[in-house]
Amino acid sequence: MSSSLFSSEHLLFTPATPKYDAIPLIFAFPNEYTVGITSLGFQVVWSTLAMREDLEVSRLFTDISETLPRQAEILGFSVSWELDYVNIWNLLESLNIPIRAHIRNHNHPIVFGGGTVLTANPEPFADFFDVILLGDGENLLGNFIDAYKEVRNADKQTQLKALAQVPGIYVPSLYKVEYHSLDGAIKSIQPISSEIPAVVQKQTYRGNTLSASTVVTEKAAWENIFMVEVVRSCPEMCRFCLASYLTLPFRTASLEASLIPAIERGLEVTNRLGLLGASVTQHPEFHDLLDYINQPKYDNVRLSISSVRTNTVTEELARTLAQRDTKSLTIAVESGSEKVRKIINKKLEQDDIIKAAINAKAGGLSGLKLYGMVGIPGEEAEDLDATVGMMKTIKKAAPGLRLTFGCSTFVPKSHTPFQWYGVNKQAEKRLQILQKQLKPQGIDFRPESYNWSIIQTLLSRGDRRLFKLLELTRDFGDSLGSYKRAFKELKGQIPDLSFYVYDEWESEQILPWHHLQGALPQSTLLKHLTEAKSFMKSSEELMLNPV
């Protein structure tokens, strides 16, 4: 079974032949092969490591692995989903490596992790990583390996102290967190000695060559897809959005130097092309890219685009996608309420949304998927009516277009202006209200699990004290009930569920990621939060003093 998975791979890079004293390294994805190999981040990091002759790299998934070294010196995890921490523990145990970093000795590998989840807030997972890489891997990865080589034969503590000097490398054990009380807020986060940097700065790659698939396989969850990263980050800066705020600035891949050569390389081995990015259609040369893909020689290419900005949906785009085997398009509108869109800085008019639907239908697409959100700070009951009204208007404007409304609950994310807010306790009820009103309209309503939003919030706002909780929930199972049970068991030892999930935090409060610097300083985030609040206020004033 395993050999057939690996033998189905078309590699788009040439792995190096390891030198005689190469460092044995395991690079793991804490999920099954079909999921892991579909992750562009995993592919790119793996190929970057495998092209170095000073490393001997083996891949590890939860269901299969390549031949693993007897004693790895480095073990890395690519983390793209919060709940995969359970699989990380299982993999560590299968390799006879203690889960807690401080128990490991010099015979154990240095365990590192990277990816969006850990860059956003590594603290709930801090106790089981020796090293966490914050930010873009392009330069960081090489700097990490080079720094390790310098101290390869030193003792573990010396290794960790040396690695902590590299910008973007965070060694959690070298920072001490103090709390006002066992179950209170954080009092301070300090390095354990003056030689350790007080703040770790997330690393940003500023080149104009972005990522592209390094392997294509029919065994991937998206079968035989070749993925190209068209843009990185998003210039819109919706105030709740981690994909925008954490990854700033907005960067675009060069059409001539990066995108076209990559696409040509990929389409030699497959006819499935995926254009990735938070806002692909905002690439300044997007129309030229479409023209390029529209050449007759690519007539059999199946094209998919991750998500597009609503006011860039032209009839031409819809036609290109329809001709390339795409049935529907995905746009994020968040809410049908103009007030809510102003609060979150969603620069969209109702007309833009309706026009997108009309263009999608005119171009030959059969469906349109809209993403919405409930429980956004400042949202009132009448804002839900506006969303229902918007969906009815779209249905009328583009009859016959199959409409899907996917809806999540607002989850506060670190390094965004809304990180101080908690989850709205009315959110679950609001999802039910939308369901009740949209279903009879023939609109396919797909709510994201409210309970999963609660767990996500817990992990996105959590601090190191959650480690005990995560250990307990592992025994109880990963439902919300298990987390509540674990909180009950730890009462008095850690803050309660409300503190992490529902409470609005003070702007002076020390946040769990206080010592980790994202793309923007806290002062800028607070300024953006004040702007958001001004729209909440003005609507409240209108209600009190109607014109």
Image (tube, grey):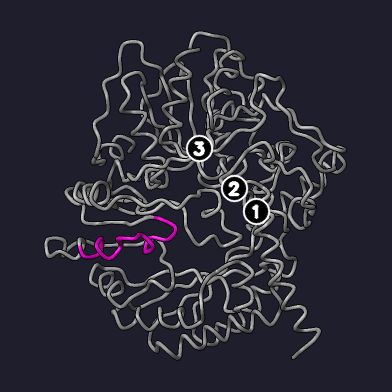
Front in this rendered view, residue 25 or 201: 201
Q: x, y (%) of residue 526?
A: 69, 55
Q: Amino acid at mark 2?
A: Leu
**Mark 2 Cα shell of 10 Å, populated few (<14), some (14-19), many (≥20):** some
Structural crowding at the residue carrying mark 3, measured as other residues with C-alpha within 10 Å and reported as few (<14), some (14–19) or many (≥20):
many
Magenta portion: prevailing SS class: helix
- Label 2, label 3: how many angstroms apart (C-alpha)? 12 Å
Determine whether label 2 and label 3 are within 8 Å by CB: no
Q: Check the image and report above or below for 111 versus 331.
A: above
Nearer to us of marks 2 and 3 is: 2
Amino acid type, residue under disc 1 in the picture: Leu
Which region shows up in magenta? 277-291
Image coordinates of residue 314 in percent, x first then y, are: 33, 75
- Residue at 41% across, 50% down: 251
The label shown at residue 520 is: 2
Q: For the residues marked 2 and 1, what is the alpha-carbon distance in whole angstroms?
A: 7 Å
What is the x, y in percent for residue 188?
78, 34
> First in sequence: mark 2 or mark 1?
2
Question: Which element carries disc 2, helix, strand or loop?
Answer: loop
Q: Which residue is mark 3?
A: 203
- Residue at 58% x, 83% y is 388
Residue 295 numbered mark, or none: none
Q: Name the residue that disc number 1 marks.
A: 525
